[in-house]
Image (cartoon, rainbow, N blue to C red):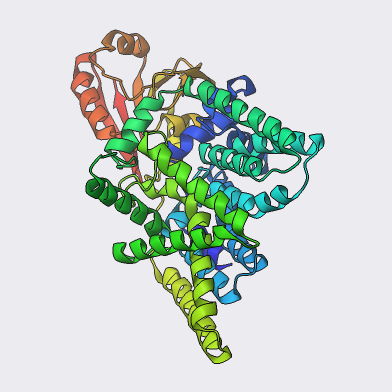
Amino acid sequence: MTAFVLRRRGLPDNGLWHDDAAPSLGAVKGSLSQLLTVSFDHPGFTLLLRAWWPLTGEDSLRLPYLALIAGTLSPPALYMVLCRLGFARSISALLGAALVASEMDIIYSERVKTYTLDLLVVLGLALLVPVLARRSWRWQSGVAWFAGAAVVGSVSVFALIATAVAGVVLVLHSRSDRTVRVLAVGAQLVTSAVFVAAVHRTYDAQIVGTYWKRQLDGFLDFDLNPVRFGGEVVEHLTRVAIVFPGGPPWWATLCVLAAGVGLLVMARVGRNAVRARFLLLLALIAFAAAVVDKVPFGPKVGAPGNGGRVTLWLVPVMAFGLAAILQLGRHRIASRSPLRIAFDAVAFGVAIAVVTTALGRDAPQYPFPGSKSATRFVESELGKRDVVFVLPGGRYAFALDSDYALSLREQPSRSVGFAPESHDRRVSYFDSLFNPDRVAGQIERVLQGADRVIIHAATGGAPEKWLYTLGLYRVQIGFTVERSVAFDAARVVIWQR
């Protein structure tokens, strides 16, 4: 219940901003033939959104509920899994409370993103892999694994990596059924590679990679100097722990080192050895992918950008490692009953304090609200002899919330591989490369016979820049400003001829 209360406070109430509106538009108004184009790297999530859409009453403000459900379920799921695997209830409660209070998990439980689902995927695989490793596989088992991995891996690139690593671990722990496992996992890895290649043809992955590298320091810079590279590694590992379990940098560094030791100890022998090996290999693959600039690992945490969102899928790695080291300490240090009771009391007390402190924090604010009201206002004002210019930063939200006819055109040279294209002659969408001086002829054709120009400017795409540039051009084409109306962070400007 506490997890739900913390996560619902920052849900959008007046439209989705650019980063949420784009995947929502692709899911809601894209065709199935465009699935890869409009899905970025998560067609499974896009299909979930598409199925969820009619259940929301076709209300875009309810599309984040999928992430909210996953984020709400994650802390109790972590607690129950740890308890089921033999960890003390006090330790399980402490780590569950840390996830309840995780600021990054709270924020991305309120967005149209896969990050909270990714956490559940990795947690589920950590529970399932040892069970599958122990069983003897037949051909039916191989087919079931291939199909299940394909479905789960389609949720996101992180889910795809996690299922691939799980497959490798299952092959490494095969016995007389090695042939079946190798064929099933081999087919899975080939299919995954084909999928990644196909997806990367739909948008410019290099632009995305450059953003993560330059803006958020999401990749590791390899250095032959072990001291410099060691410092780089510690910095990125610390950022992973800042997301979970949180705390100041010195504490996060201590936690990530303790978690690593805990996983190494757990991986040696015992009921959780295969589980720990899966999580260790997952972290190692994620680390290696960051060294070659493929997958962000430990990017900068916090605004601008909230790079820590791509760390949520590694929360189970940290949680199991910390649970292992705390369990070891509980048995070694508190071997006698009174000390064990004291240990549990302190752990429960800290868990309560963590949750109470989280409840006292200010709720996260959804970014750039107002686009939905601005869109409704445009719809109420737009007449037969008017035109509307939808500026960058708001075009996906406007296309999602308005009823004007449109299609989605491909743009594989951009970071978002599709954009809305209006079928209503009155509506013009401008993309981020728009420059009025370069398209003056096009603007004049659009404005022929128009009485008014209604400009929809949603913050998030530098609307002030576009409004200023258009304003310089406005006088040349014979328009004056009739009025300007603000809707939270969005604005509608009306020109009169």
* x and y, in percent, of residue 464 in the image: 24, 34
Q: Residue at x 36, y 62 (%)?
A: 252
Residue 441: % across, % down = 29, 8
Q: Quadrant of the C terminus?
A: top left
Q: In the depicted view, which residue is nearer to us: 115 or 317?
A: 317
At which x and y percent is residue 304? 30, 46
Tell me if residue 147 can be seen: no
Rendered location of residue 142, percent (x, y): 75, 36
Q: Establish if 487 lies above or below 446.
A: below
**Which of the pair 312/416 is nearer the observer?**
312
Residue that extends furthest to the front in the rendered view of this protein: 176
Looking at the image, the residue that sits furthest to the bottom is 338
Inspect this view and state whether residue 310 appears: yes
**Picture quadrant where residue 461 is located:** top left
Name the residue rendered at 51%, 22% in the picture. Answer: 197
Which quadrant is home to the N terminus? bottom right
Question: Which of these two is toward me, 482 or 414?
Answer: 414
Give whichever of 138, 404 is nearer the camera. Answer: 138
Q: Please state if 229 lies on the left or on the right of 292 as rendered.
A: left
Q: Is residue 447 above or below residue 337?
A: above
Q: Is residue 286 left or right of residue 270?
A: left
For image coordinates 57% across by 41% down, the residue present is 165
Q: Quadrant of residue 219?
A: top left
Decide: is 361 above or below 140: below
- Can you say whether 64 is above or below 315 in the image? above
